[in-house]
Amino acid sequence: MKRHHDLGGEPGGPIDPTAHPVEPWAKLITATVGALRSRGLMTVDELRRTIEDLPPEIYDQPYFERWAEALAILLDEKGFAPSADVGASMERMMAEMEAKP
């Protein structure tokens, strides 16, 4: 069975080569993944597996949104932080960011 992320042999469409500003939270996701990997608490293969297992409606989100979703799943799988706690923290942070002028 072909998985949603498997585009082998299909046209990929145009690539946008313009630079995109990186949001601070995306840098935090990258740093968190790097810290977990450097301490042997997570592997790049686990992250890849988790990203590729995301349902299509989540997998079709932008790059760092997929990383964030996969990281939350891995933190839960490994018993570091339940998904509900991660989700509640993310909602709190988003509300705080939106409230700032």
Image (spheres, grey):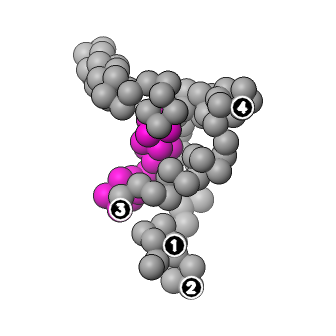
Q: How many numbered discs? A: 4
Decide: marks 1, 2 in contact (CB < 8 A)? no
Decide: marks 2, 3 in contact (CB < 8 A)? no
Q: Amino acid at mark 4?
A: Gly
In the image, residue 69 lies in the stretch drawn in magenta: yes
Q: Which is closer to the viewer, label 2 or label 4?
A: 4
Residue matched to label 4: 40
Q: Position of residue 86 (x, y in %)?
A: 37, 26
- Distance of mark 3 from mark 1, alpha carbons? 11 Å
Residue matched to label 2: 9
Tell me which numbered mark, 1 or 4, is placed earlier along the sequence: 1
Task: Pick the quarter of the image with the N terminus.
Answer: bottom left
State the residue at coordinates (34%, 23%). Answer: 85
Q: 10 or 43, which lies in front? A: 43
State the residue at coordinates (58%, 52%). Answer: 48
Residue matched to label 3: 56
User: What segment carries the magenta color?
Assistant: 56-75
State the residue at coordinates (29%, 23%). Answer: 88
Q: Which is closer to the viewer, label 3 or label 4?
A: 4
For residue 60, above or below residue 100:
below
